[in-house]
Image: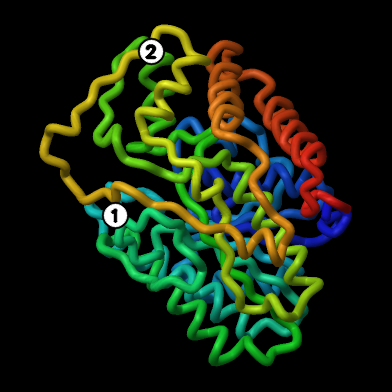
C-alpha cells in the first residue's frame, strides 16, 4: 500500500484539522503529493502548526460551501485520490450553530460530489462521515454498514444528510461511471496527540492537567469505541487503495473501529490516562442538567473491513492511551519542540506493530 501512494496527487479536505493533519503527515511519509483544502486552522494550538506541516502540502484555504472553488481546485490540480474529511465535528457547537453545522457537513459534501460528477479524470474518492450517522438506538451490538442512517441531534443529522447525498449521487451518477470510484468511511471517537478541540475528553484533560487544574467530566459512564487517530486513517488509506483495485467495492461503506466487544467508559479512559500523567484531578458533574443530548452507548461492527480490506485495528486500549498521552507529554515537557519528528515516529511505530500482527493492509 505504501508504494501505491508514492508520487500520487492526493487531495485532502480538512487537512488542517486533527485527523486531516495526521493523514497529511502520513501521506507525505509515503511520498504522496498532497493538496490540502481547509477553511482555516480550527484550533490554537493545532497539530498542523506544531507538526510544521505547512511546507509539506500545497495549502489552500476556502470554504467547501463554495462550489466553484471546489470545482476549480479539482480542475487545477487533477488529483488522483480524494479524502474528504472537512467537517464541523463538535456536538456541542452543533447545538449552538445548527445552520453552520448542517451546511458545512451536508452542503460541503454535496459540493465535493458535484465537482466529482463533472470531473473528467480518473479519480478515487473516500468520503468520511461518522459513526454518529447511524440511527443510534443504544444497541449492545455494534452497528453494521446496512443499519439505518439517521440522528437524534443536529450533528448526527448533518452526517446523515451527507450520507444521503453520497448515496443519491452514487445511484444517480457514479454507479456506472468508469472514471470515478467512491467509498464511504464511518468511524468515531478518535483520540491521539494534537487534538485541541473544545469539549472533548482528551484535550480537556490535557489542557487542565498540564496547568495543574481539575477537569469537569459531563458523562463518565458513557461508553465509546475509543481508538487512536491512526487506526481509522489506516482504514481510509486501505480503502483508497482497495477501491483503485476492485470495482466491486465502488459505492460501498465501511466501519473502522476497535472490536465491538472492547467496551470502555469515559472514566476508564481517564483512569488509564492517569497511569501516564502525574497529579491528575477530575470531577464528575453528571448530576448537573446537561445542555444537550449525548448517546450513552455507540459501537461499530467492523467485520466488513476485515473481510474485504483485510483491515483490523492494531492497538489495544492500553496502547491507544499510552501513545496518546506520550504525544502530549512530549509537547508540554519539551516546550513545543520536535513534534514533527515525534509524530513521524508514532506513525512508524504504528506500522511496525501492524506488521508484527501480520495485518495485510500494511503490505506494499
| Residue 89 image offset from top left, x and y in percent | 41, 52
Is there any visible trace of residue 248 in the rendered image? yes
| Residue 143 image offset from top left, x and y in percent | 45, 62
| Residue 352 image offset from top left, x and y in percent | 79, 35
Which residue position is annotated with label 2?
280
| Residue 74 image offset from top left, x and y in percent | 66, 72
Residue drawn at the location 61% of the way across and 84% of the way down: 117
Where residue 146 is drawn, which disc sits there? none
The count of marks equals 2
Is there any visible trace of residue 101 in the rendered image? no
Question: Which image quadrant is residue 285 in?
Answer: top left
Residue drawn at the location 51% of the way across and 77% of the way down: 166
Instruction: For mark 1, give the secondary structure.
Output: helix
Question: Which image quadrant is residue 238 in?
Answer: bottom right
Colour scheme: rainbow
Along the polypeptide, which appears first: circle 1 or circle 2?
1
Left or right: 38, with 297 as reference point:
right
Nearer the observer: mark 1 or 2; the answer is: 2
Instruction: For mark 2, give the secondary structure.
Output: loop
**227 or 155, nearer to the observer:** 227
Left or right: 228, with 314 as reference point:
left
**203 or 150, nearer to the observer:** 150
> In the picture shown, does residue 353 fall above or below 305?
above
> In the picture shown, does residue 128 fall above or below 214?
below
Which residue position is annotated with label 1?
94
Question: How many angstroms separate mark 1 from mark 2 (CA)?
Answer: 30 Å
Residue drawn at the location 88% of the way across and 54% of the way down: 3
**317 or 123, nearer to the observer:** 317
Left or right: 252, with 155 as reference point:
right
**174 or 334, nearer to the observer:** 174
Residue drawn at the location 65% of the way across and 57% of the way down: 236
Amino acid at each position: 500500500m505504501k508504494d501505491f501512494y508514492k508520487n500520487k496527487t492526493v487531495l485532502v479536505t480538512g487537512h488542517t484539522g486533527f485527523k486531516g493533519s495526521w493523514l497529511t503527515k502520513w501521506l507525505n511519509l509515503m511520498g504522496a503529493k498532497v493538496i490540502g483544502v481547509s477553511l482555516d486552522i480550527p484550533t490554537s494550538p493545532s497539530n498542523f502548526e506544531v507538526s510544521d506541516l505547512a511546507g509539506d502540502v500545497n495549502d489552500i484555504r476556502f470554504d467547501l460551501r463554495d462550489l466553484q472553488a471546489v470545482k476549480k481546485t479539482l480542475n487545477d490540480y487533477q488529483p488522483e485520490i480524494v479524502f474528504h474529511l472537512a467537517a464541523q465535528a463538535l456536538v456541542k457547537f452543533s447545538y449552538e450553530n445548527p445552520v453552520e453545522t448542517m451546511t458545512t457537513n451536508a452542503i460541503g459534501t454535496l459540493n465535493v460530489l458535484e465537482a466529482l460528477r463533472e470531473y473528467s479524470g480518473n479519480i478515487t474518492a473516500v468520503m468520511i462521515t461518522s459513526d454518529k450517522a447511524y440511527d443510534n438506538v443504544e444497541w449492545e451490538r455494534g452497528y453494521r454498514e446496512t443499519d439505518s442512517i439517521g440522528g437524534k441531534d443536529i450533528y448526527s443529522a448533518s452526517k446523515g444528510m451527507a450520507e444521503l447525498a453520497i448515496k443519491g449521487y452514487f445511484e444517480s451518477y457514479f454507479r456506472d461511471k468508469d472514471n470515478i470510484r467512491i467509498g464511504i468511511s464511518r468511524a468515531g471517537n478518535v483520540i491521539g496527540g494534537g487534538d485541541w478541540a473544545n469539549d472533548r475528553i482528551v484535550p480537556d484533560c490535557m489542557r487542565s492537567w498540564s496547568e495543574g487544574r481539575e477537569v469537569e467530566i459531563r458523562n463518565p459512564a458513557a461508553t465509546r469505541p475509543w481508538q487512536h487517530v491512526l487506526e481509522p486513517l489506516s482504514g481510509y488509506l486501505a480503502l483508497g487503495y482497495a477501491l483503485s483495485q476492485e470495482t466491486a467495492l465502488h459505492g460501498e461503506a465501511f466501519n473502522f473501529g476497535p472490536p465491538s466487544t472492547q467496551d470502555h467508559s469515559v472514566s476508564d479512559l481517564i483512569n488509564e490516562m492517569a497511569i501516564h500523567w502525574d497529579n491528575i484531578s477530575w470531577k464528575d458533574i453528571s448530576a448537573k442538567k446537561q445542555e444537550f443530548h449525548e448517546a450513552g452507548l455507540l459501537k461499530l461492527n467492523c467485520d466488513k473491513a476485515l473481510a474485504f480490506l483485510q483491515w483490523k485495528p492494531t492497538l489495544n486500549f492500553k496502547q491507544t492511551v499510552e501513545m496518546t498521552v506520550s504525544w502530549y507529554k512530549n509537547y508540554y515537557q519539551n516546550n513545543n519542540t520536535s513534534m514533527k519528528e515525534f509524530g513521524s515516529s508514532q506513525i512508524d511505530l504504528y506500522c511496525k506493530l501492524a506488521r508484527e500482527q501480520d495485518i495485510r493492509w500494511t503490505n506494499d
